[in-house]
Amino acid sequence: MPKPSRLSAAALAATAVLLSSVLAGCGDDRPGNEDLTRQKLVWRNCPAPSPAQGGGDAPSPLPDGDDWQCATMKAPLDWEDPGGATIDLELIRAQASGPANQRIGSLIFNFGGPGGSGVTTLPAFGADYAKLRTRYDVVSFDPRGVGRSAGVRCENDQQLDAYFQQDATPDTAPERAELVENVMEFNNACEKNSKKMLPHVRTTEAAHDMDLMRQVLGDDKLHYFGISYGTELGGVYAHLFPEKVGRAVFDAVVDPTQDPEQGSLGQAKGFQLALDNFAENCVSQVEDCPIGETAQDVKNRIAKLLADLDRDPIPGIFPRELTQTAATSGIAQSLYSQDFWEYLTEGLEQAYDGDGQILLLLSDSMNGRSQNGEYSNLVPANVSINCADDKPRYTSQYVQQKVPEFRAASPLFGDYLAWGMLSCTDWAVPGAAEHPDVSAPGAAPILVVGNTGDPATPYEGARKMVQALGPGVGVELTYRGQGHGAYDSKNKCVQDAVDGYLLDGRVPKAGTVCSES
């Protein structure tokens, strides 16, 4: 099973849609001999998202009436053969709303995952970046292998339903063998259906795509806002093109010094911390907490629910049941934002009464499943990019030995995240490195924002990113809050610091701390 993705706004946008209630090819095989930096983008009104992007309606106009515009940019399939075959990368933008003489350039967003569609996520959160839009064209894109950008395909919708219902925390030898077989079938389907793309979805290639994008958009420097995995992509870009870094912000920061095992263990601790905070918050309310008398009672009842579901799933959304795996991923999804704690409370109340609908909806959002049963390519892209990037390959025997350590880090999420390390076992393409190189001597200052309550990218990663970028590059800002990411928390201190840098070039004092209001 894939581990919870380092996804921020994309996952949360999908959750909000669910709870409020055609795949692009691999590109042009002809040689691309033309100078791709000279291509002219043809901007058009954006179509409705494809199934691979998550489906739904075309983006609504912005509050000022301006339309979102989309365009297709050609990039080399293989950056080691830049004159060869090309792929199409899908872009979206909203042009700067302020005076033309105050425009700085384009501000490129990556919202994380890896595997999240920036083309669908940016409009969902467009209002949050209205101030930044006064001086920038706000731009995002589907990275290679994602959505309409030569999206990776693996299993079909019916197969994915079964894949996400499987027992991802095996307790016996037969269950372990079945999990290994299911992961192998998923990985084989990726190779069969996307063999051409799998060697070319590494983060280093996406960073080269962004530099091409910078040039095609007409900017001398790359102005960038990276969230979650987007911070890793931004760090890799800064390493490869330090002299081209403009004003850049990293929010919800990936620790670039960790290998996949260390990253998964860090997530176990992060999600446990978020669950602890959720439980404490519930019992501290003026009204009685409906899911437990004490914080420990809340967690004990959740643990019992998951153990019961391992033996006997309950009805979810017909014909699917709420399994232990689905409940665990649904709980994890709700911890990405404090705004969704109320849905977790309601979902747990419902599950204790034998109805798993809300938790299954949350799990569907984590996995990119829409209400009509279609899956985006979020998970296939997430697995493909992670496995192309990450060199380690873990066996069932190795994971089994590590389960006690993970369980000690998180009684509720440890097993789930430990067994998620099997995702790249027997992957068709070798991984590139133990961890990304983000050293960027000579780059302009990069504002690195860490959130003390972040479950998916634990707070310690921000300090590690600052150190890895090198002296004089990373500038750390701490947000003492909850959820995955800081800027979209609407915290005024965080937003003033970020806006001040991106709009006016004011670098905050290193070590600045912002607290929840």
Image (cartoon, rainbow, N blue to C red):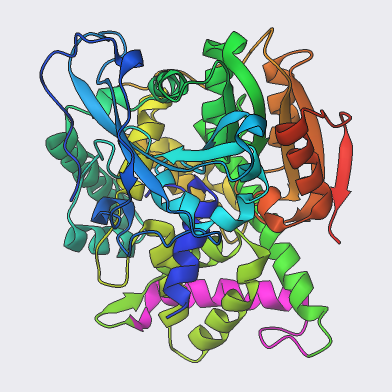
- Residue 412 location, x and y as percent? 58, 61
**Is 259 contained in the magenta span?**
no
> Which one is in front, 406 or 145?
145
**Dividing the picture into quarters, in which one does residue 336 lie?**
bottom right
> Which one is in front, 19 or 364?
19
- Residue 124 location, x and y as percent? 49, 58
- Residue 267 location, x and y as percent? 60, 46
- Does 193 sit above or below residue 175? above
**Is 312 contained in the magenta span?**
yes
Q: Where does the C terminus fall, quadrant-wise?
A: bottom right
> Which one is in front, 323 or 499?
499
Q: Can residue 433 be seen in this view?
A: yes
Which region shows up in magenta?
A: 288-316
Q: Is residue 409 visible?
A: no
- Residue 23 location, x and y as percent? 19, 47
- Does 232 sit above or below residue 340? above
Give me the residue at 62% from left, 55% from top.
128
Give me the residue at 60% from left, 34% from top.
100
**Dividing the picture into quarters, in which one does residue 252 lie?**
top right
> Which one is in front, 256 or 378?
378
Give me the residue at 44% from left, 70% from top.
17
Q: Is residue 128 left or right of residue 166?
A: right
Q: Is residue 403 left or right of residue 429?
A: right
Q: In this view, does 492 lie to the left or right of 270?
A: right
- Does 158 sit above or below residue 50? below
State the count of labels: 0
**Dividing the picture into quarters, in which one does residue 203 lie?**
top left
